[in-house]
Image (cartoon, helix red, strand yellow):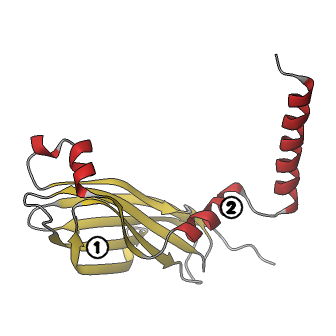
């Protein structure tokens, strides 16, 4: 049974949220994007030390080096020309030799209607042991046509290979 005082607290909370969303012209996705952007910075960030990752993934029982991308995302997925998005991925790596790193090439390609419209290549991308997050911020050109775009992420070395595609939409800019 919910006590009357609890009902009033819940009702006040719901009214506060409704008022907040009405007064501030942010959609939930825009609010999420602003929070995400504030928390992420371009570059690499260590999330977990190698020994914890080795324990979590039972790396002593695996063929080494072990590499896996845990997350690969584009935020936000709906954009307007001139907007910026975050390409975020996180990976884990268990080395064959303690503290070993792997040199790779990181490719980011954006496709529109089957053609590459943007490409970024990072030579000597260093894959480090443990869990790492990698963030890049990419701005959509102001003259970008509306439609569906795809971001292809590829990591290539002599020891590992990874390739994945994430889609996002560029919407028409509203006329003022």
Alpha carbons under labels 2 and 1: distance apart = 29 Å
Q: Residue at x 27, y 66 (%)?
A: 154
Residue 7, x across and y down, in percent: 88, 29
Task: Work out whether residue 88 or residue 145 is closer to the camera in this orientation and state it.
Answer: 88
Q: Nearer the viewer, mark 2 or mark 1?
A: 2
**In which quadrant of the rendered image does the C terminus lie?**
bottom right
Task: Work out whether residue 26 or residue 148 is closer to the camera in this orientation and state it.
Answer: 26
Q: Residue 6, relative to residue 98: is it above or below?
A: above
> Is 90 on the left or on the right of 42, as rendered?
left
User: Total label count?
Assistant: 2
**Residue at the spot of label 2:** 31
Q: Residue 33, relative to residue 175: is it above or below?
A: above
Residue that extends furthest to the top in the rendered view of this protein: 1
Residue 1, x across and y down, in percent: 82, 16
Q: Quadrant of residue 173?
A: bottom right
Q: Residue at x 55, y 79 (%)?
A: 144
Residue 91, x across and y down, in percent: 30, 58
Q: Residue at x 23, y 56 (%)?
A: 50
Residue 61, x across and y down, in percent: 11, 40
> Is 94 on the left or on the right of 119, as rendered?
left
- In the rendered structure, find residue 107 and report the number of the disc placed on it: 1
> Is 76 on the left or on the right of 155, as rendered?
right
* Crowd around label 2: few <14 · some 14–19 · many ≥20 (10 Å): few
Task: Work out whether residue 85 or residue 167 is closer to the camera in this orientation and state it.
Answer: 85
Tag 2 secondary structure: helix
> Is 159 on the left or on the right of 14, as rendered?
left
Q: Earlier in the sequence, mark 2 or mark 1?
A: 2
């Amino acid at each position: 049974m919910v006590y009357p005082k609890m009902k009033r607290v819940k009702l006040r909370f719901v009214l506060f949220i409704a008022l907040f969303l009405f007064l501030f012209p942010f959609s939930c996705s825009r609010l999420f994007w602003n929070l995400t952007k504030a928390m992420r910075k371009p570059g690499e960030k260590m999330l977990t030390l190698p020994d914890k990752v080795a324990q979590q993934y039972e790396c002593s029982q695996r063929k080494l080096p072990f590499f896996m991308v845990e997350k690969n995302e584009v935020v936000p997925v709906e954009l307007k020309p001139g907007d910026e998005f975050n390409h975020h991925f996180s990976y884990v790596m268990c080395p064959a030799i303690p503290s070993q790193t792997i040199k790779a090439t990181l490719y980011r390609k954006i496709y529109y209607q089957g053609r590459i419209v943007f490409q970024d290549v990072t030579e000597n991308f260093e894959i480090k042991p443990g869990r790492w997050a990698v963030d890049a911020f990419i701005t959509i050109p102001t003259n970008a046509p509306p439609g569906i775009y795809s971001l292809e992420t590829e990591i290539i070395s002599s020891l590992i290979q990874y390739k994945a595609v994430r889609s996002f939409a560029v919407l028409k800019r509203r006329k003022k």
